[in-house]
Amino acid sequence: MGLKGTLGIVSAFMGKNDKKLTWDDAAQLMSTGRWDAANHSKSHDMSTFSSLSVAGLREEINGGRADIISHLPGQKVLSFYTPGGVSSDNIVNVTKEEHLVLRLAGGNLNSWPLSMGDLYAVKVCGPLAGTTSSTMNSWLDSAISGKKWLVEMWHGVGDDASDWGGNCAEADATAHLEYVASKNNAGKIWVATLDEVAIYNAERLAANIQKVSETSSQTVLSLTDNLDDAVYDQALTLNVTIPSGKSGATVTCAGSNLVATVANGKISFSVAPDKGNITINWV
């Protein structure tokens, strides 16, 4: 299907018994390039989480992230899933110390485009036992028609009973994910992990586009964001109006060819900030 997902990890649960995911299992998922890791706290103790001191929250939130990074090197782990969806000023402030996202456990669709504050109260739609594929498909349809951001929260897939309201039936999960893939393949949506969306959003807000030079046959642009390129590495899509008398262009960045498409009098291409000058040769 070509879809991506994020695995929310409670570090103290890893390999705890024969039903729990191990660090090796998680590493194998990450190696496919279709998964990344999110921090779901160190112990997921919902009975005490909302009443923890700032020091206790740092141990649960930042400590959980440190555990994940130590076992899964190369993972950025910029998203935090708060246990039970609880939030408070202290939880938000501690999350901000090392994360770009705080994901809750309920709500609905998220606004788009995002402010940085929106990322610390991310809402979700979550399939449970009895949730049909048509219901899940309606979430996606509403996101597309309303130009919203849909975040889906999955706890389990299968026909057996489980905690968290029960697993989503396998047939419904398959039908829904096939529907998501069809919209993705048709270019109707962008399927990305929470980290990728957060990085993209920060770049979009910080982007600085300058015209370096221009002639009748060529336009040279620069795209910068003054962010850490080791973290902020998502491509942004630029739409440039085609000059009168021209029908298209070839586009390069620092000498490398970029894929460019033409539609509605504009040329579109994607490039990450701080990669060098962007040269558009008009034809």
Image (cartoon, rainbow, N blue to C red):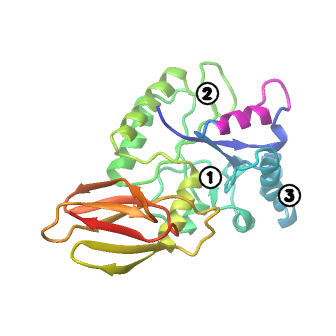
Q: Residue at x 58, y 41 (%)?
A: 5
- The disc labelled 3 sits on which kind of residue? Glu
Closer to the camera in the image, 96 or 138: 96
Q: Secondary structure at mark 1?
A: loop
- Magenta part of the chain: 16-31
Find out whether residue 17 is within the magenta segment: yes
The percent position of residue 3, horizontal first and vertical second, equals: 50, 37
Residue 168 x, y percent position in the rendering: 56, 27
Dot placed on the residue nearer the N-terminal end, 2 or 1: 1
Provide residue 227's location: percent of width, then percent of height: 60, 71
Decide whether residue 68 is among the magenta residues: no
Q: Residue 104: which disc? A: 1
Which comes sooner in the sequence, label 3 or label 1?
Answer: 3
Answer with the quarter of the image where residue 184 lies: top left
User: Which callout, 3 or 1, points to the residue nearer the camera?
Assistant: 3
Q: Residue at x 31, y 73 (%)?
A: 219
Q: CA distance from mark 2 to mark 3?
A: 30 Å
Q: Is residue 51 visible?
A: no
Amino acid type of disc 1? Leu
Q: Residue 186 appears in which quarter of the rendering?
A: top left
Give the residue at mark 3.
Answer: 59
For residue 123, above or below residue 58: above
Q: Look at 54% across and 67% down and name the residue there.
A: 202
> Which of the 4 image quadrants contains residue 230?
bottom right
| Residue 124 vertical placement versus 3 (above, below) | below
Residue 68 locus on image (x, y percent): 78, 48
At label 2, the amino acid type is Asn
Give the numbered dot on residue 167.
Answer: 2
